[in-house]
Image: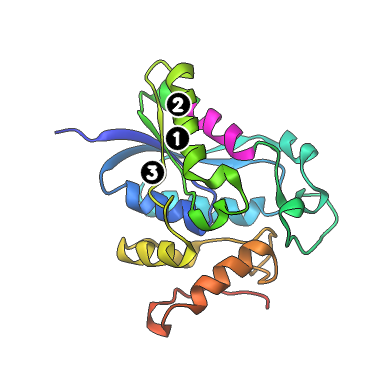
Amino acid sequence: MSRATAIAMVSGGLDSLVALALAVRDLDIRLVLYFDYGHRARESERASAMAAANFYGLEFREVNLAWLGDLSPGGMRRDGEVSALTSVDDVWIPNRNGLFISVAAAFAEAYGCGAVVCGFNREEAAEFPDNSADFVSRSTAALQLSTRNAVAVRSDTIDMDKREILRAGADAGAPLSIIWSCYHSAQRMCGRCASCLRLKAALASLADDERPVLEFES
């Protein structure tokens, strides 16, 4: 019996990697999509997303949405002034996930796939409504009208926090050491931005023998 097919959105971070690792168990992933949206972390994120695609033997494609950087907070832009990036106002990208899902759904319809896989979670949903279960369900409802094959949004991490996502990734054999969950691009994750702080808190909750090897500047 053939498996259902899907397109996966992978940013290079923890959530999307684990969502991919969970999805490949019962879906035929036809394509990994990575989005360049004019953001500071693009090079490091892209390397991680490509590594994830290579690990699972999947086709990789980068979509250029660099113009979105012009609408983004200065600290998030590739050419913007470096800042700590610790508040929602610092990092909110206008309609980013809505745009990503719409683009991924176009690929899904063209490839004959029934789903878009993405890594959202309840921890970030507390501050970012476009990470919530409600966002996933409403996006799926909209796609029933905008795609001829009624593409659905799937996020196996949607009810998890970061600690639970780490555990799920380890159980699924995901290559957690490749992730890039920092808003900056450098040799190592900064350890100070909001994304790094969330990841570090989750890592600290794990026993030493459970913790993936990840490097931070501080």
Amino acid type at mark 2: Ala
Residue under pointer 2: 141
| Image location (x, y in percent) of residue 188 | 64, 70
Q: Residue at x 41, y 45 (%)?
A: 155
**Depicted 137 relative to depicted 169: above or below:** above
Q: How many marks?
A: 3
Q: Which type of secondary structure does the marked residue at label 3 adopt? A: loop
Q: Quadrant of residue 167?
A: bottom left
Tell me the amino acid under the disc marked 3.
Leu
Q: Measure the alpha-carbon separation of dots 3 and 1.
A: 27 Å
Q: CA distance from mark 2 to mark 3?
A: 28 Å
Residue 137 disc label = 1
Q: Quadrant of the N terminus?
A: top left
Mark 3 crowdedness (10 Å alpha carbons): few <14, some 14-19, many ≥20:
some
Q: In front here: 141 or 106? A: 141
Q: Residues within 10 Å of mark 2 (few under 14, many from 20)?
A: some
If you read the primary sequence from the N terminus, does the residue marked by circle 3 or circle 1 appear first?
3
User: Are the two marked residues, 2 and 3, in contact with CB atoms closer than 8 angstroms?
Assistant: no
Residue at label 3?
A: 58
Residue lying farthest to the right in this orientation: 81
Q: CA distance from mark 2 to mark 1?
A: 6 Å
Name the residue: 49% across, 59% down: 14
Residue stretch rendered in magenta on the structure: 96-105
Tell me where residue 7 sits by quadrant: top left
Specify whether 168 is left or right of 92.
Answer: left
Q: Are marks 2 and 1 in contact (CB under 8 Å)?
A: yes
